[in-house]
Amino acid sequence: MDKTYKVIMVKHGETTWKNRGYYSGWFDPILTWKGEQDARTAGKALKDAGYKFDITYTSALSRAKKTLAIILREIGQKDLPIEKTWRLNGRHCGNLTGQRKTEAVVKYGEAQMAIWRRSFDVPPPPMDEENPNYKYILRKSRRTNWPDLEEFPMCESLKQTFARTLPYWNEIIVPQIKEGKHILIAAHGSSLRAIIQHLDQITDEQVLGLKIPGGVPFLYELDEELKPVENGSLKFLGEEEAVKQAMAHVLAKGKRNRTNNTQSTV
């Protein structure tokens, strides 16, 4: 039988800013009660399925780290090694950070927001000193697991986000997979989409339309060349009804946001 590898990934749970319609980017809002509950449900799903892990990876942002911590507590592996890196952070929203999505439409106009929303390689405006979150975010350059000031981005397109995520996947995570380690990654929609695009070889247009529900773990089963086996891509884990509800929530939210012209990939 051919050798296969399994990798589990999960997007962080809902945050206070997400709940209120703000762009978060590299700001650090906390999880809502629902976000924490989503993480507990994810942990229960993994525990019930019998998953155990050797090493975990997450971003440098609290919402992903908290989601991971809750999951590890649920599966009885709270002391597992955790590798944290800014390269798994979500997309930097630039000067949109801290703005309500509806307010951004008023400020920049529907046409411009549509460009940022539908574009793979056009970034939002860079964060400047007038943004009230500027100093808070820039101070992170002094911390471990964050980029130093010289490479600290002030905004990112999805293309730029993918460009700093994939080297970490290829150079750090892939060798651990090939050693047979059982891997869990807790990160963000944009950084996880980079990995998904790489594994499934989907187009930029397809990845723009990909929605990942928060707090629902998903499995990739890979062959020896780290390509998905047949029916081995993006397999959501958990009780069938819970998975359906999570997907329905994402689809409904996307439909509602399109109606309001505020859905965004940033």
Image (spheres, grey):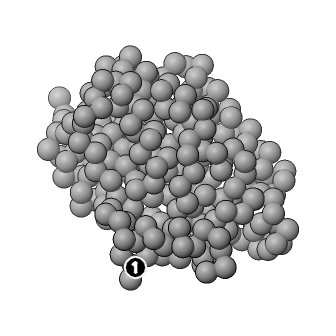
- Residue 65, how many percent across, how many down? 41, 45
- Residue 63, how many percent across, how many down? 49, 47
- Residue 119, how many percent across, how many down? 64, 68
Which residue is at 35% across, 65% downward?
143
Which residue is at 49% across, 32% downward?
39
Residue 135 position (above or below residue 227): below
- Residue 82 appears in the figure: yes
- Residue 48, how many percent across, how many down? 38, 16
Q: Amino acid at mark 1?
A: Leu
Residue at the far left in the pictured view: 179
- Give the labeled residue for mark 1: 149
Instruction: Return the residue nearer the eye: 16 or 12.
Output: 16
Which residue is at 50% across, 43% downward?
12
- Which quadrant is the C terminus positioned in? bottom right
- Is disc 1 placed on a helix, strand or loop? helix
- Which quadrant is the N terminus positioned in? top left
Which residue is at 65% across, 50% downward?
17
Q: Is 141 displayed left or right of 224 in the figure?
A: right
The image quarter containing residue 92 is bottom right
- Residue 202 appears in the figure: no
Residue 263 position (above or below residue 180): below
